[in-house]
Amino acid sequence: MTKLKANMLDYTEAEVSQLPDELLNAEWRQYMAFSNQRQRLREEVQRMMRKKSAEHQVKAGDIAEGSMATTKLGAKEILLAKVAGEIYAIDNACGHSGYPLDKGKLDGYVVTCRWHDAQFDVRNGAVLAVGREMKPINRYRVVRADDGTIKIGEEL
């Protein structure tokens, strides 16, 4: 049985194409398990950092027009955004992975998470965009042959 190299990045594309499917599947499962665990750890670290952040008082005059600051409400970190002279308060954790929204960009009433591009309305916390723009995937016509075999037709 073929043994994988210690690091899949050490393979050339030609070498990867020659590996048995069971090894590639095993490597993929291992990578996904690691990736999911790492993402959960990142999210937990972000939450813990905000819980442990220092509590501080913020004055309205400390927040410039069109900018953001943070404060605390118990263990929760709160994002303060000043737009059109009004100060709005929402949770400082992005709904996607809990990353701090104050590190993102404020454009009018919209705060954008710098990690995944999710967008929220600071007036009410509504999700305006779920994040990274995804390209649509292609769709194809399904054709049934006379013998019952499924054929793939043209792209729709």
Image: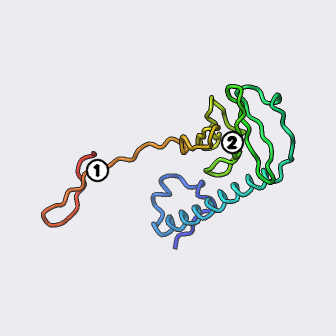
Report which residue position mark 1 lands on: 140
Q: Name the residue under label 2.
A: 101
- The residue under the point 70% across, 27% down is 66
Name the quadrant containing residue 107: top right
Could you tell me which secondary element the residue under label 2 belongs to?
helix
Specify the label residue 49 is tagged with: none
Callout in the foreground (1, 2): 2
Residue 126: quarter of image: top right
Q: Residue furthest bottom?
A: 1
Residue nearest the observer in this picture, 1 or 133: 133
Q: Position of residue 115 (x, y in %)?
A: 64, 43
Instruction: Determine the secondary structure under disc 1.
Output: strand
Residue 124 location (% of width, % of height): 62, 41
Is 70 placed above or below 147 here? Answer: above
Residue located at (72% from left, 30% from top) = 67
Q: Which residue is drawn at 55% across and 64% down?
A: 27
**Viewer-side residue, 86 vs 138:** 86
Nearest to the observer: residue 53 or residue 127? 127
